[in-house]
Image (cartoon, rainbow, N blue to C red):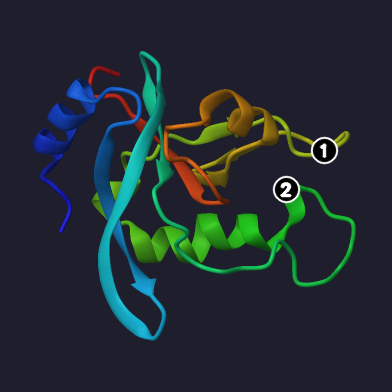
Amino acid sequence: MNPAPDLLAQRLAQARVNDPLEFGAYSQSSGDDRKEPIQWRLLDRSDRSVLLLSDRILDCRRYHHTFAETTWRGCDLRAWLNGEFCAAAFTDEDRTLLEPAACTDNGNGAPDTADSVFLLSVKEVRTLTGPGNGAHGVRPAIRLRSPTA
């Protein structure tokens, strides 16, 4: 369902900020278990990787199972995104392209994390999403290795 690695590498190399890209597949309709390609939007690029944000909200999950003080490091949503969701949405080959992202804005005094699938921090939302670029709502983000890395 995903483009061949060489084709994906070519698309990543040519993609510019705000370009759409398909990567992975996940059921995106209520009551329908059929997987559909996930549409991502390129938010940022570096020499090593590209930052992609899902065009759609892909699922509805609680941040944590109880109303308790918890940071990103200890929340259920982080565990689900990097466990069950990652396994369901990406093939073994896809997962080799995921570049763990350093998440440093995890709450007051919370240790940093490295996540394959994550939510943008408040700072990233303010910096990378703005009027006219179509990035609204809480959606998963991923970092993929650049084809030249």
Q: Which residue: 87% across, 35% down?
A: 108
User: Is residue 8 in sight in this rendering?
Assistant: yes
Identify the image quadrant of residue 80: bottom right
Q: Residue 18 in the image: x percent, y percent?
A: 34, 30
Q: Which residue: 51% across, 61% down?
A: 83
Please tell me how crowded label 2 is: few (under 14), some (14-19), or many (20+) other residues with Cα within 10 Å.
many
Residues tagged 1 and 2 counted as in contact (Cβ below 8 A): yes
Which residue position is annotated with label 2? 72
- Rendered position, 8 above or below 70: above
- Rendered position, 70 above or below 106: below
Q: Residue 118 in the image: x percent, y percent?
A: 55, 45
* Amino acid of disc 2: Trp
User: Is residue 91 in sight in this rendering?
Assistant: no
Question: Of all residues shown, which one is farthest toward the bottom?
Answer: 31
Horizontal placement of 60 versus 89: left or right?
right
Q: Which residue: 75% across, 54% down?
A: 74
* Amino acid of disc 1: Ala
Q: Which residue: 10% across, 44% down?
A: 4
Which residue position is annotated with label 1? 110
Sequence-first disc among 1 and 2:
2
Please tell me how crowded label 1 is: few (under 14), some (14-19), or many (20+) other residues with Cα within 10 Å.
some
Taking depth in this image into account, of 137 and 3 the one nearest to the observer is 137
State the quadrant of the N terminus: bottom left
Give the secondary structure at mark 1. loop
Give the secondary structure at mark 2. helix
